[in-house]
Image (cartoon, rainbow, N blue to C red):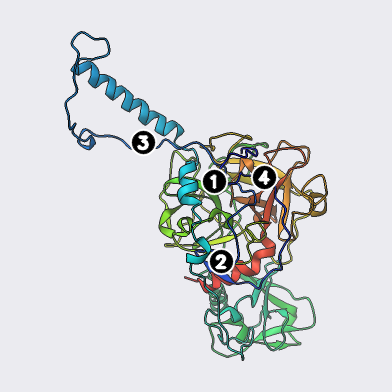
Amino acid sequence: MAKHDPNDLPPPYYSLDLHTQPPLKPYEEVVYGVGPGLTPPSHPRYIPQYPPPVVVSPVTQSSIPPSSKRRRCCHSNAQCYGGSGGTLLVLGLLALAIWLGVRYGTRLATTAILHDDYNDNDDYDDKIPQRYDTCSNSTVKCDGIIDCKLGSDETNCVRFDKSNGLQVKTSQDGRFLPVCHKDWNNNYADETCAQLGLRKSYVTGKIKSQGANVLSLTSRKSLLLQSRVKVSSSCPNQEAVSLQCVDCGRQKTTSRIIGGSAAKEGQWPWQVSLHFRGSHVCGAVLISRDFVLTAAHCFPSSNSLSTGNWKVYVGLMSLTRPTQPYMVKRIILNNNYNNKTSDQDVALLKLETQVTFNDNVHPACLPAFDQEFKPGTACWTTGFGTTESGSGVVSKELMEVTVDLIDTGVCNGPVVYGGAVTKHMLCAGDLDGGKDSCQGDSGGPLVCQGDSRWYLAGITSWGVGCGEKNRPGVYTKVKSVLPWIYSKMQQEKP
């Protein structure tokens, strides 16, 4: 990760530029674009500008165009070669070029690709279609009746606590309440998970209910759970519903080596590599069979927002051994994303086809709304990023490093980031330097362990330098953007 160089184009990664935070808007969706009034990114990014990749396709004799003009040949000059010698030299050079392509083909996209295609912001904000929901004046939130064109009035009506307890908000009460387990069954579980864009349930059970009021199931027919329950003061045995929609956060192996080492197969099965026109440019995180989370700043232009330019690789341990890619169906940016401050730096990708899970491909768990990751917690970040500051080559192998969460107050101190870390961000690393997510990737995961599962605490967003003193990595706080994530998965449900 290179340090600030005024001659770099576009504006250099990690040149800290502080801006006043504008008021946040309500959650809205931007499809293939960013919100009105946003200017091209000036805030530091985890997308370094590196030398060009050397990706050479195998060359066959038929692919070489015929010469349009025969060369002159000197018969007694050392600079001219006989037919057989010239052929051997050409073949040798071709072999060397192919070897170089394989050896160094894992560099990031060229400056030309990133700047001319990837970062081409020509009339970006004016040309990108934006998608806002429209609602009637009589709209009622969470009543089970879709009043808005995109259904935003019936999103964020279901959530989960850290015990997997199911909570639902209804128009009758306006509060999130637990659902009584009486009459609950697997059909209700599958329909609730499908409502959230998660196809079907993984496991459902019962937990002890807390509080005086609960929601009891009714006989009403509806696809939305909030219209099938009513507020009640009684629940047999105080047993409430627990529900898990996705089998997540499990590893094939748990043995690790601390400190920026190569990961083992199956160790971080939710890691995703995003390729723009054939080159790795960002990391991402698998959260279900249909959806991937990454950073919004990975899509800085109209070209980068064209789904056909992207391929999604899961279960990848080395960039030199690619797996079968998945294609992107939709790119959805958080409309609250501010490309000057990097606030709410998150994007959701919907895949064309659902991912098949196995030991090497498995989603990370989304955190619960009440789940806390305390300062000092040892978490892990992974990716194919550079392994040292100023390096021009991404790692061919998936790398891992452990980082400690840092209190936001400390991170916002005058000797660290001086107030640049918002409530939608978290810091992780070592204030003494040495460990940083420059060994990860933009859009890649910061995961923390809890109850034998791994939860997605953050998404790699920005920082200053690489492993420098008082310059830890900064991540989008996933818990803070959960309402947006669930609302978009629900609107884009398969």
User: What whole-number distance in Å separates the C-alpha atoms at marks 4 and 3?
Assistant: 34 Å
Question: Which secondary structure, mark 1?
Answer: loop
Question: Which secondary structure, mark 2?
Answer: loop
Q: Is residue 31 above or below residue 195?
A: above
Q: Is residue 107 above or below residue 154?
A: above
Lateral position of residue 370 relative to residue 317, left or right: right
Q: Considering depth in this image, is 311 or 11 the residue closer to the camera?
A: 11
Q: Which mark is residue 266?
A: 1
User: What whole-number distance in Å separates the C-alpha atoms at marks 2 and 3?
Assistant: 44 Å
Residue depth check, mark 2 versus mark 3: number of the one nearer the observer: 3
Residue depth check, mark 4 versus mark 3: number of the one nearer the observer: 4
Inspect this view and state whether residue 380 appears.
yes
User: What whole-number distance in Å separates the C-alpha atoms at marks 4 and 2?
Assistant: 45 Å
For the residue carrying disc 1, how many other residues have a C-alpha within 10 Å: few (<14), some (14-19), or many (20+)?
A: many
Q: Considering depth in this image, is 393 or 201 the residue closer to the camera?
A: 393
Q: Amino acid at mark 3?
A: Val
Residue 278 in picture, x, y percent from top left: 42, 46
The residue to which callout 3 is attached is: 56
Residue 483 in picture, x, y percent from top left: 65, 70
Precedes in sequence: disc 4 or disc 3? 4
Precedes in sequence: disc 1 or disc 3? 3
At 62% from the left and 68% from the top, the residue drawn is: 484
Precedes in sequence: disc 2 or disc 3? 3
User: What whole-number distance in Å separates the C-alpha atoms at marks 2 and 1?
Assistant: 21 Å
The residue to which callout 2 is attached is: 202
The residue to which callout 4 is attached is: 15
